[in-house]
Image (cartoon, grey):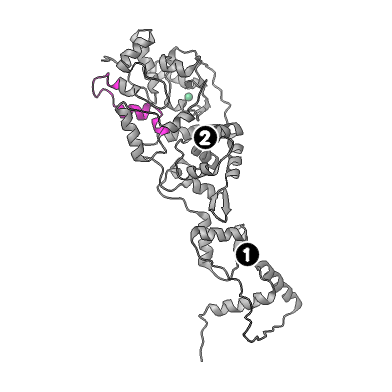
């Protein structure tokens, strides 16, 4: 039974609390302290980004109700960041597993965790500030999430502690930040994009546990509304993956985008982004930062309007004399694209239909009107712009349109 365990500081990483226990225990052998903390689970990895059975092992060594296990997981590990895109029932299952010591890292996360030289990180100015306020510096959860490179509070670059073979070393040994050699000089040379990404990482981690992605995808809709649209005859409206990838590279730099997305955005990746099946928040955050969308909009239960659909519906309601060619020009699209969109939205055509060919059997009449040449030229140009094959067909369609309106008073 542990007789004493430190109270975590605000936003302190669970591993950091363990390190402070180690310091105050007065014992210098890491394995002895690990046995004290974890009992029979002394071999547990204690510095993983996603929490594991180490939390349960420590809690079960403490007198009951000294610590609230749920609070420890939610506020002192990046659990909520890594499960932010999960639906509530799935997140609940993961949380309960951890609380009962069965915590397994979701497999999709294994692939995305940084390898090799990635170690715990700190902000030089937070080190100074924490030492002043709490008497010692500590590791912050929000600084450890790999996508984030900046301390949001001090707007300076995060630095990494110097340990050899960090993955192995940190999981087996205690490296309290207060006992580490830290760089005192802050690096303030950061880009607005880096800062924005770090702010969003923090928000995704800090949002209440009751926030998860709604069934619609506002981020995807904002992409479409902002012109990242590809219209295909078969698939209807999808995100323009090439344009999106290029815009992300422009905003974040190619190296960052390659790290998070790989060398391009495939159709299946785009589909998984749309349906929230992409469970790591990193890709959503890069897109969100580039679009300048706030986090509230992303998680809003209210869908953002589909501007293209609204435009089409508005044109349909307005009705009046228009042709497919005109509609296409107004929307800045090709005619086949307008047709594809119409099918995508399940709408009926609202423009003038093609004039049917002349009937072979009916007797023909002739309609003639006389205009001056200048006016004829204007009519000719106008009818060409609308897509009529000749000004006569246009004139006839105009007459039919007026007559179709049908509400002309007809009095004897
Ligand atoms: Zn800081």
Expressed as whole percent of the image width and height from the top left, the position of residue 176 reads: 42, 15
Judging from the image, what secondary structure is the residue with disc 1 in? Answer: helix
The answer to whether residue 357 shows anywhere in this view is: yes
At 31% across and 32% down in the image, what residue appears?
96
Residue at image mark 2 = 196
Expressed as whole percent of the image width and height from the top left, the position of residue 158 reads: 51, 24
Q: Is residue 283 left or right of residue 96?
A: right
Position of residue 66 relative to residue 270, above or below, is: above
Q: In the orientation shown, which residue stands out farthest toward the front?
A: 361
Question: Which is more N-terminal, label 2 or label 1?
Answer: 2
Q: Which residues fall within the magenta stretch?
A: 58-82
Q: In the orientation shown, which residue stands out farthest toward the right?
A: 373
Expressed as whole percent of the image width and height from the top left, the position of residue 53 reads: 34, 24
Asked if residue 255 lies in the magenta stretch, the reply is no
Q: Nearer the viewer, residue 23 or 152?
A: 23
Position of residue 403 relative to residue 111, above or below, is: below
Q: Nearer the viewer, residue 137 or 97?
A: 97
At 34% across and 16% down in the image, what residue appears?
42
Judging from the image, what secondary structure is the residue with disc 2 in? Answer: helix
Expressed as whole percent of the image width and height from the top left, the position of residue 316 reads: 52, 65
Instruction: Report whether the residue tagged 1 is closer than 8 Å to ligand 1.
Output: no
State the quadrant of the N terminus.
Answer: top left
The answer to whether residue 5 shows anywhere in this view is: no
Q: CA distance from mark 1 to mark 2?
A: 43 Å
Q: In the orientation shown, which residue stands out farthest toward the left?
A: 64
User: Which mark's residue is nearer the viewer, 1 or 2?
Assistant: 1
Q: Quadrant of residue 32?
A: top left
Residue at image mark 1 = 325
At 57% across and 47% down in the image, what residue appears?
240
């Amino acid at each position: 039974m542990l007789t004493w365990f430190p109270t975590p500081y605000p936003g302190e990483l669970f591993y950091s609390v363990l390190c402070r226990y180690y310091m105050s225990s007065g014992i210098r052998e890491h394995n002895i302290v690990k046995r004290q903390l974890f009992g029979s689970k002394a071999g547990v990895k204690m510095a993983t980004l996603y929490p594991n059975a180490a939390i349960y092992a420590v809690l079960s060594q403490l007198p009951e109700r000294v610590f609230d296990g749920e609070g420890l997981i939610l506020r002192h590990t990046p659990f909520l960041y890594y499960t932010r895109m999960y639906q509530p029932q799935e997140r609940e299952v993961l949380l309960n597993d951890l609380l009962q010591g069965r915590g397994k890292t979701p497999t999709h996360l294994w692939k995305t965790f940084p390898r090799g030289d990635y170690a715990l990180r700190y902000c030089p100015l937070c080190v100074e500030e924490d030492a002043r306020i709490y008497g010692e510096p500590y590791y912050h959860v929000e600084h450890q999430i790999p996508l984030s490179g900046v301390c949001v509070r001090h707007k300076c670059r995060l630095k990494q502690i110097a340990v050899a073979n960090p993955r192995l070393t940190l999981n087996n040994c205690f490296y309290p930040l207060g006992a580490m050699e830290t760089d005192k000089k802050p690096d303030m040379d950061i880009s607005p994009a880096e800062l924005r990404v770090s702010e969003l990482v923090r928000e995704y981690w800090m949002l209440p546990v009751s926030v998860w992605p709604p069934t619609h995808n506002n981020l995807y809709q904002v992409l479409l509304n902002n012109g990242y649209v590809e219209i295909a005859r078969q698939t209807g409206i999808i995100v323009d993956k090439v344009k999106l990838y290029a815009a992300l590279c422009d905003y974040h730099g190619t190296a960052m985008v390659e790290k998070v997305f790989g060398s391009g955005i495939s159709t299946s990746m785009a589909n998984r982004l749309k349906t929230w099946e992409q469970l790591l928040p990193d890709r959503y955050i890069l897109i969100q930062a580039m679009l300048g969308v706030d986090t509230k909009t992303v998680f809003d239960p209210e869908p953002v309007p589909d501007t293209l659909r609204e435009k089409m519906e508005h044109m349909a309601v307005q009705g009046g004399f228009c042709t497919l060619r005109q509609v296409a020009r107004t929307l800045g699209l090709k005619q086949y694209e307008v047709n594809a969109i119409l099918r995508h939205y399940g709408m009926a055509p609202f423009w003038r239909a093609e004039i049917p060919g002349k009937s072979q059997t009916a007797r023909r009449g002739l309609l003639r009107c006389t205009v001056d040449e200048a006016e004829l030229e204007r009519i000719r140009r106008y009818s060409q712009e609308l897509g009529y094959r000749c000004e006569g067909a246009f004139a006839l369609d105009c007459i039919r349109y007026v007559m179709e309106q049908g509400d002309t008073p007809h009095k004897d």
